[in-house]
Amino acid sequence: MSVTARIEQLLQSHPVLLFMKGTSDFPQCGFSSQAVQVLQACEANFQDFNIFEDAELREALKAYSSWPTYPQLYIKGELIGGCDIMIDLYKKGELAQMLAAANEA
């Protein structure tokens, strides 16, 4: 299976997926930690993916998403953005709505 196919399979398998450095239980960078905190504040049901465990996928995802940094949040297969965008959407109340809608489907 190609790395692009693996990325697409992950995105299809999880309505809310956070590609991050480390795991939600043990984030390995400040931005990933903040992203997890925002998702937990929204009481989101999400899956994390530790990019340190798959170097091929880590590099391919940057090209796939046209987004060069981590974390990357996807909701229903669509890139939402990184930590700063997540915090902005959270402060506006939009992130919680997006997350709720994703888990209803």
Image: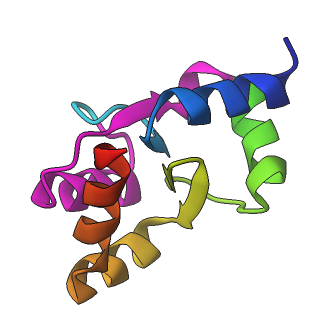
Q: How many marks?
A: 0
Residue drawn 70% across the image and 31% down it: 7
Residue lying furthest bottom in this view?
A: 92
Rendering coords of residue 58 (x, y %): 69, 36
Q: Would residue 32 be found to the left or right of residue 1 on screen?
A: left
Whether 75 is among the magenta residues is: no
Q: Is residue 103 above or below residue 22?
A: below
Residue drawn 21% across the image and 49% down it: 44
Question: In the figure, residue 66 lies in which quadrant?
Answer: bottom right
Rendering coords of residue 50 (x, y %): 48, 29
Q: Nearer the viewer, residue 64 or 56?
A: 64
Q: Would residue 23 be found to the left or right of residue 54 on screen?
A: left
Q: Is residue 100 above or below residue 94?
A: above
Rendering coords of residue 80 (x, y %): 53, 65
Rendering coords of residue 14 (x, y %): 46, 32
Task: Tell me the quarter of the image containing the C terminus.
Answer: top left
Q: Is residue 83 above or below residue 105?
A: below
Q: Would residue 40 be found to the left or right of residue 49 on screen?
A: left
Q: Would residue 59 be found to the left or right of residue 95 on screen?
A: right
Q: Which residues are the magenta region?
A: 27-54
Whether 47 is among the magenta residues is: yes
Task: Tell me the quarter of the image containing the N terminus.
Answer: top right
